[in-house]
Amino acid sequence: MSVQEYVVSSSGQMSLPASVRRRWRLDDGGPVDVIDLGFGVLTVPKGAGRRLLGDLVSRDEHAAFVRSLDDDPDLATT
């Protein structure tokens, strides 16, 4: 596992490396989960996002965090 740098296009698109697409069985494309952490985003295979959040933080803690974001309308809608 390593940190890699990616380029996001002006339309918001980003490419996953071929090795990741193969591992996640996305050779022909497909959906992924994106978790907006506020300070960055985490991209995981589809279905893994909710499980990961459930393991990391309780529903009540997550709801309280989202409510605390009312000064950032983009983050408060996630």
Image: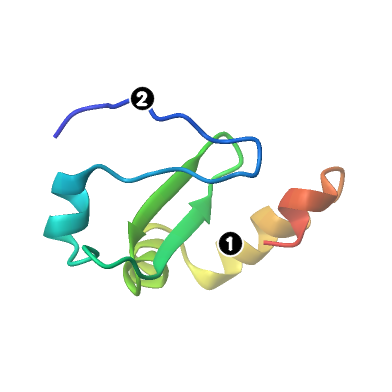
At x 65%, y 65%, the residue is 63
- Res. 69 in view: no
Q: Whole-percent x and y of residue 1?
A: 13, 34
Q: Amino acid at mark 1?
A: His
- Res. 73 in view: yes
Number of disc labels: 2
Q: CA distance from mark 1 to mark 2?
A: 28 Å
Q: Whole-percent x and y of residue 49?
A: 39, 65
Tell me the SS state at disc 2. Answer: loop
Asked whether, in this view, residue 26 is left or right of residue 67, the answer is: left
Query: Which residue position holds label 2?
Result: 5
Task: Please state which of residues 55 and 22 is positioned toward the viewer in this rendering.
Answer: 22
Q: Residues within 10 Å of mark 1 (few under 14, many from 20)?
A: some
User: What label sits on residue 40 in the rendered view?
Assistant: none
Query: Which residue position holds label 1?
Result: 62
At x 48%, y 67%, the residue is 58
Q: Residues within 10 Å of mark 2 (few under 14, many from 20)?
A: few
Q: Amino acid at mark 2?
A: Glu
User: What colour scheme does the image use?
Assistant: rainbow
Q: Residue furthest front?
A: 28
Task: Please state which of residues 15 and 40 is positioned toward the viewer in this rendering.
Answer: 15
Q: Which of marks 2 and 1 precedes in the sequence? A: 2
